[in-house]
Amino acid sequence: MKIIVTGSLGHISRPLTEILVKQGHDVTVISSKPERQKEIEALGAKAAIGTMEDAEFLIRTFAGADAAYCMEAPGHFFDHDFDLMAHIDMLGHNYVQAIAASGIKRVIHLSSIGAHTDKGNGILAFHYNMEQIMHTLPADVAITFMRSVGFYYNLFAFIGTIKTQSVIASNYGDDDKDPWVSPFDIADAIAEEIENQKPGERKVRYVASDELTCNEVAGILGEAIGKPDLKWILISDDQMLKGMLASGMNPAIAKGLVEMNASRRNGILYEDYYLHQPELGKVKMKDFAKEFAAVYRQSN
């Protein structure tokens, strides 16, 4: 198949591209960075250099393809003029235009836990909006919404407080239980869905690798970095928000992140996940802890 992969050579798109090329597919990777072209081609894929904000570019790039993996990265967290929800809606409509114009019949969309609702999930409401936009595609287009849980690599954000205060601190934590996922397990699941989609099928697939309490996570990471007493402490929503605003974060995004974390505590975020709990992937927190330790040692 001719398959379009968005997300450049990011955490998921790189291993996905490697899998699809190995399977013999004709893969085109979209990247906004011209310097990525040689790296993409070295993997055996074609490079399409442009942005997802450019609908005409997407229409040209998607032409003649059989399948597409579509994702959006929120970004711009510290730009106070950035309207995240409006930006994501625009990307969604660009995708719909390109998919409909190309005649692609297989779509895999990277969504998120929490996309089952537009209320009480904070910043993740944009995933709910995006799923609704994708549902406007013609009925013969198969779509799998890959609802990932929390990415292991999000834990890198805590390296600073671990180094300065010897704790992980957030407005969720302690003995709250969270599912986590490796991008490698997501890439495997996406490749599987591309092969197995049925004509016109619309489905949700949750992807997770491990389920642990936050204190269990702290214990595993602490052992890996030589801090066996590392704890994950729970701070208030107000403390979390004040810290984000003090760092210069866009106020709307900061409030959305705080609400998202609060929804981990009150159960809103996971209510649909536990109704459709997936088989866990291969990459466990103890595997990721080795990568975490390497990044921790190299950080200032």
Image (cartoon, rainbow, N blue to C red):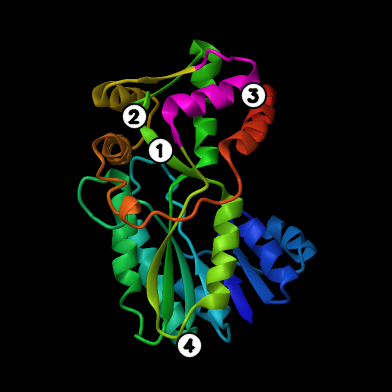
Local crowd at mark 2 within 10 Å, few (<14), some, or many (≥20)?
many
- Residue on which disc 2 sits: 172
Q: Name the one closer to the observer, 138 or 116.
A: 116
Question: How far apart are labels 2 and 3 at the CA level?
Answer: 22 Å
Q: Give the range drawn in magenta.
A: 212-230
CA distance for labels 3 and 1: 20 Å
The amino acid type of the residue labelled 2 equals Tyr
Looking at the picture, which amino acid does disc 3 mark?
A: Ala
**In the structure shown, which secondary structural element does the residue marked by tag 3 occupy?**
helix
Q: Which of marks 1 and 2 is nearer the N terminus?
A: 2
- Viewer-proximal residue among 5 and 252: 5
Which residue is disc 1 drawn over?
A: 178
Say whether disc 3 or disc 1 marks the residue closer to the N-terminus.
1
Quarter holding the C terminus is top right
In the rendered structure, the answer to whether residue 286 lies left or right of residue 275 reads right
Q: Is residue 25 magenta?
A: no
Q: Residue 191: percent from the left, percent from the top?
A: 59, 67
